[in-house]
Image: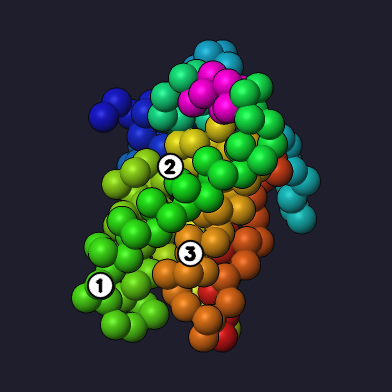
């Protein structure tokens, strides 16, 4: 993977970064990091914001532009949008909701089969990270004092989910069904709402 691609993936996963942070992560000079960042800005993939520091000059933080986010896969998005439009035209909003429900049940059954040997919450979530990462969601798991955060740094169906919000709700439903009624799954960050990632809090 090229250095520029690795930089984009790092920012996609971790959020805004300074040239100093990037130089430490990739073992390059700050000047080299700045050159890469500026080149990506010229390509329209990155943007920056100067944030005032407590002491000295402001720190320049670099983040992905919409074009930068589009460098990551959004599987079959044009075809998917066309299908969604056709379903809505032929069957209305009710038809879209039925399609989302059918997809929800199919995904749930597939995941449940893959997770059948997972007996603990942690093992279920680790398997879910594996499954979702294989599908392009760049998933990770973090433990918190109150439970877990299930994080998806990318949404490969984002365009479709923006067009059909029932898809987002069905994904939340799938997670809740897999985890079970002993725990609550709530979405605290949402890519479709303009945030950098989707985050689900799992608490008891």
Assess whether residue 81 is covered by the magenta stretch: yes
Compare residues 120 and 31 and report the one nearer the observer. Answer: 120
Q: Earlier in the sequence, mark 1 or mark 2?
A: 2
- The percent position of residue 19, horizontal first and vertical second, equals 52, 38
**Mark 2, residues whose alpha carbon is within 10 Å: few (<14), some, or many (≥20)?**
some
Residue furthest to the left in view is: 117
For image coordinates 47% across by 78% down, the residue present is: 180
Dot 3 falls on a residue whose secondary structure is helix
Disc 1 target residue: 116
Of callouts 1 and 3, which one flags the residue occurring earlier in the amino acid sequence? 1
| Quadrant of the rendered image containing residue 118 | bottom left
Rounded to the nearest whole Å, what is the CA distance between mark 1 and mark 3? 14 Å
Q: Secondary structure at mark 2?
A: helix
Q: Which residues are magenta?
A: 80-87
The residue furthest front is 91
**Residue on which the image places disc 3:** 175
Q: CA distance from mark 3 to mark 2?
A: 26 Å
In-image side of 57 versus 84 (left or right): right
Q: Choose mark 1 or mark 2, whichever is in front.
A: 1
Please name the colour scheme applied to the rendered image.
Answer: rainbow
Label 1 Cα neighbours within 10 Å, binned few <14 / some 14-19 / many ≥20: few
Which residue in the protein does label 2 denote? 10
């Amino acid at each position: 993977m090229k250095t520029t691609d690795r930089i984009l993936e790092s920012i996609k996963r971790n959020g805004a970064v300074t040239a100093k942070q990037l130089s430490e992560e990739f073992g390059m000079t700050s000047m080299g990091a700045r050159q890469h960042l500026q080149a990506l800005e010229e390509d329209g993939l990155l943007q920056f914001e100067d944030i005032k520091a407590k002491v000295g000059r402001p720190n320049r933080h670099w983040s992905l532009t919409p074009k930068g986010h589009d460098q990551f896969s959004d599987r079959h998005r044009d075809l998917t949008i066309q299908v969604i439009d056709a379903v809505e035209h032929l069957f209305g909003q009710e038809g879209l909701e039925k399609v989302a429900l059918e997809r929800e049940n199919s995904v749930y059954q597939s995941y449940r089969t893959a997770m059948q040997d997972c007996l603990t919450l942690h093992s279920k979530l680790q398997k879910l990270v594996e499954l979702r990462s294989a599908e392009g969601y760049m998933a990770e798991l973090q433990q918190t004092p109150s439970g877990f955060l299930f994080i998806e740094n990318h949404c490969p169906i984002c365009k479709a989910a923006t067009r059909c919000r029932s898809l987002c709700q069905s994904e939340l439903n799938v997670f809740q069904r897999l985890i079970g009624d002993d725990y609550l799954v709530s979405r605290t960050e949402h890519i479709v709402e303009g945030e950098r990632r989707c985050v689900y809090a799992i608490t008891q």
